[in-house]
Image (tube, grey):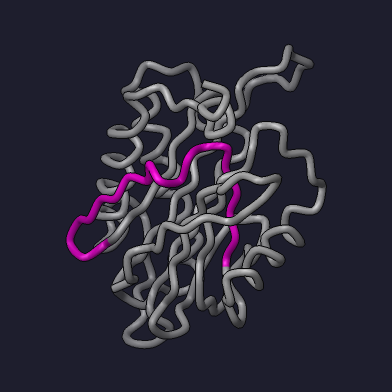
Amino acid sequence: MLPEPLLTTRREDERDIPVLVWRAGRPLLAVSSAPLGGGIGVRRWVLNATVPMSYDRNDPADHLAELAREFGLDGPGVGLLTGVDVAEVARRTDTGVQVWATVGLGTPVPAAAPTVAAPAQPVGTVNIVAYVPARLGDAALVNVVATATEAKAQAIAELGLPGTGTPTDAVTVLCPPDGPVNAYGGPRSTWGAPLARAVHAAVLATGRETAVPWSDRLRG
């Protein structure tokens, strides 16, 4: 299993900003769309950091690498950012699959909607971190990202929101690097099915409440 994340803080601009840190007991195989550590490869840790809504750095991977060094995280890892207070992470398990989701749905958009200039809106991000307790082949790793995304979109539809996700969502799925290889990760596969159920439950539970961005909360 992947140990529960540590909820900690970092000091920035005289404020304590929340951060979630997962430290794997051993290197794990991961697939991720995160700014830092994206792609497929062996990873040792995951970091999900809250940022203020005024965040305007154009080097998120470098920023996350700085945070990793600050927390003493060695070797390759995965880094995610969100305007949501990560202390409000939702955790769900299903048949050995673990899922943690930080859910902000301020700007749900249909994936294929036309790209047009729009007034500034509250930024939303759904970050999903999952652990599957069986070795997944490369194709299955790609497939579980699609499965998690489909489950998220299903939850958003059931919440009655007009979108399939937000423009900044990210998914990270980890699994053991050894053992018999599972070739499939779709929503009816051995491990894709419980992953879909756990992601759906986590997003549905947190999405029912309006997430106030962490920095907006500071202003009262």
Give above or below for 210 relative to 177.
above
Farthest right residue in view:
58
**Residue found at x 34% / y 24%:** 209
Residue located 44% across and 37% down the image: 103
Q: Is residue 68 magenta?
A: no
Task: Please state if 123 lies on the left or on the right of 156 as rendered.
Answer: right
Residue 122 in sight from this viewpoint: yes
In percent of the image, x 21 and y 65: which residue is there?
A: 96
x and y percent of residue 9 in the render?
52, 55
The residue closer to the viewer here, 218 or 67, is: 218
Q: Quadrant of residue 124?
A: top right
Q: Position of residue 10 (x, y in %)?
A: 58, 56
Residue 162, position in %: x, y? 48, 17
Give, as a single range, the part of the protein colored magenta. Answer: 78-97
- Nearest the viewer among 68 and 39 is 68
Q: Quadrant of residue 155 in the image? A: top left
With respect to residue 50, does 191 lie above or below? below
Q: Residue at x 50, y 72 (%)?
A: 45
Decide if residue 38 is on the left or right side of residue 93.
right
Instruction: Classify residue 3 as left or right of residue 128.
Output: left
Where is residue 6? Give x, y as percent: 40, 63
- 89 within the magenta span: yes
